[in-house]
Each structure stands twice: as structure tokens, then as C-alpha cells.
Amino acid sequence: MDYSNPFFLHHGDSPGAIIVSKPLNGDNYNSWKRAMMMALSAKNKISFVNDTLPKPSNLYDSQGLAWTRCNNMVLSWLLNSVSTKIVNIIIYIDDAFEIWNDLQDRFSQHNGPRIFQLQKSISCLSQENNLVSSYFTTMKGLWDELANHQPIPTCICGALKTIMSYHHQQHVYQFFNRIE
């Protein structure tokens, strides 16, 4: 068996498997997507959702049957990793790539209220009675989620290094500002 073949299914792979710990509920799309991408990549099935392995034109030859079997496995994993409310919206979509895009279209929209909430949480967070390491872990989690909602654009002009340095410096100031 060629384990690197995206059509390979391990004997432990099951349509009933839950491959991420927290189901998509609508508010956690970014963290859910990251967890799903890691899980699908680990199972060598990411190509079913990123369109690098498109649906074959003939679903009844050996290649088409293998694609259908694996696509159905990925569909099952996707359905098992979202809330019941979301399952009811996507249950009749037959292609993992289409479900992936549908979920992205629905939930990856710019989330202004969440960005505001994160910025407010960062500005109000203080060490209080926590250890510095615990305080830093909480702060870092907020920074990471905010960065996921507001990624720094990439460029080839060389300014990115300066922007990243400034961004890092702001984090240091925020961190030390609330240590007691």
C-alpha cells in the first residue's frame, strides 16, 4: 500500500470518527479550520478540500470509485466536526470541496465584533494573581486569534520586516503594561 496516495484509507479511518476536538459552531471558524486542516493533512486528505484533487469526470472507473470512497470519508469527517445546526445546512452537498467552500463563505467573513472584543480583552487583561507564564499564555492566545482575524499583508518590498518589528514591539508594551 502506498501511504502517500490520497486514496489510501487506513484501517483505523472511520466515517464516524471525530477528527477535531471542538466542532464548528459558527463563532470558532478560524480555529476550527486550522484544526481541520491539520487533521486532514495528517490523514493525507487535504487535497479533497483544497481542490488539488478534483472530482474525476468518470466516477465509475477505478479512479472515480476510489475518489468517491475517500470523498465520502472526508464528507463524514466534516459532518462529524460541525454543530447539528450546521449539519442541517450542508448535509446534501456531495463534494467535500464544495462543503469546505460553503463553510468558508458562511463563516470566514470579517468579524468586526469579535475583533473589537479581542482588542478590548487585550487592553483590559492584567496579570492579577496569575503567574507571569499564565498571563503571557492568555495574552499570546488573544494576540494569535486577533492576528488570524487581521493578518498582516505580505509584500516583497522589504517593509514587512519593519512592520513585524513594530507589531512585536507593541506586543511587548501591551504585555509589560499590565504586569503587577
Image (spheres, rainbow, N blue to C red):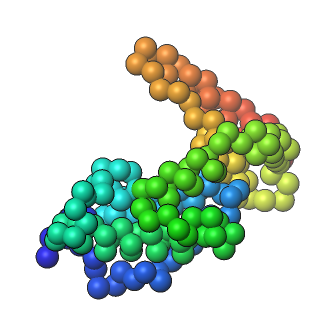
Residue at the extreme left of the image, as rendered: 1
Residue at 45% from the left image edge and 21% from the top image edge: 155
Q: In the figure, residue 75 lies in which quadrant?
A: bottom left
User: With respect to residue 176, does 127 lie above or below?
Assistant: below
- Estimate the x, y position of residue 125 in percent, counting from the top left: 82, 47
Q: Please provide percent x and percent y for residue 100.
A: 49, 56
Q: Position of residue 25 (x, y in %)?
A: 68, 64
Q: Report the front residue among 77 and 129.
A: 77
Is 113 left or right of 145, judged from the image as shown? right
**Foreground pick, 111 / 151:** 111
Is residue 77 at least partly visible in the picture? yes
**What residue sits 49% from the left and 16% below the top?**
159
Q: Looking at the rendering, which quadrant does residue 169 occupy?
A: top right
Please state if 156 lies on the left or on the right of 33 as rendered: left
Left or right placement of residue 43 versus residue 79 in this view: left
Q: Position of residue 96 (x, y in %)?
A: 43, 62
Q: Can residue 140 be seen from the camera position used here?
A: no
Left or right of residue 124, residue 137 in this image: left
Residue at 62% from the left image edge and 29% from the top image edge: 167
Residue at 51% x, 77% y is 18
User: Vertically, is 2 above or below 55?
Assistant: below
Indicate the quadrant containing the N terminus: top left, top right, bottom left or bottom right: bottom left
Q: Observer-nearest residue: 63 or 151?
A: 63
**How many numbered marks are there?**
0
Q: Is residue 26 above or below residue 108?
A: below
